[in-house]
């Protein structure tokens, strides 16, 4: 965890190599948060595109592959999906 890395950095007198590892781990944590937020946004868009209210847990048409494909890829040759 980040806290474990921070403790190790402090224990090793804040050496540059350890600080670099800490900085990289914080960067990875931030990218992970961004990726999770993006995936939640995509999920919400797919749920709504399938005719469901945002945040729905039961879906009207569980087999709406065409809606998912159009939303993700785009329609026709436009390729203007997510």
Image (cartoon, helix red, strand yellow):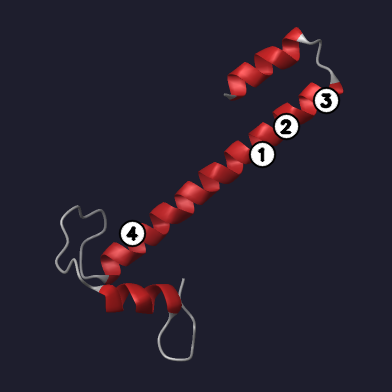
Q: Give the label on residue 46, or none.
A: none
Q: Give the label on residue 17, or none.
A: 3
> Callout 2: helix, strand or loop?
helix
> Callout 3: helix, strand or loop?
helix
In the image, is residue 78 above or below residue 20? below
Alpha carbon distance from label 2 to label 1:
6 Å
Circle 3 residues within 10 Å: few <14, some 14–19, many ≥20: few
Position of 38 with respect to 4 (left or right) is: left
Quadrant housing the N terminus: top right
Q: Name the residue rendered at 40%, 61% in the picture.
A: 42
Q: Residue furthest right?
A: 16
Q: Which residue is mark 4?
A: 44
Nearer to us: label 2 or label 4: 2
Position of 49 with respect to 71 (left or right) is: left
Q: Which residue is mark 1?
A: 27
Q: Which residue is mark 2?
A: 23
The one of 77 and 55 positioned closer to us in this rendering: 77
Nearer to us: label 4 or label 3: 3
| Mark 2 vs 4, N-terminal side | 2
Alpha carbon distance from label 4 to label 3:
41 Å
The quarter of the picture where residue 74 lies is: bottom left
Q: Name the residue rendered at 46%, 49% in the picture.
A: 37
In the image, is residue 69 above or below residue 35? below
Position of 60 with respect to 64 (left or right) is: left
Alpha carbon distance from label 3 to label 2:
10 Å
In the image, is residue 47 above or below residue 14? below
| Mark 1 vs 4, N-terminal side | 1
| Mark 4 vs 3, N-terminal side | 3
Residue 82 x, y percent position in the rendering? 46, 71
Nearer to us: label 3 or label 1: 3
Circle 4 residues within 10 Å: few <14, some 14–19, many ≥20: some
Q: Name the residue rendered at 71%, 27% in the picture.
A: 22
């Amino acid at each position: 965890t980040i806290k474990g890395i921070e403790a190790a950095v402090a224990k090793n007198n804040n050496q540059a190599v350890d600080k670099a590892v800490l900085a990289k781990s914080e960067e990875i944590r931030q990218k992970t948060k961004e990726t999770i937020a993006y995936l939640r946004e995509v999920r919400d868009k797919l749920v709504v595109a399938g005719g469901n209210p945002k945040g729905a847990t039961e879906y009207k048409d569980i087999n709406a592959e065409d809606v998912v494909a159009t939303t993700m890829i785009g329609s026709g040759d436009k390729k203007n999906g997510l």
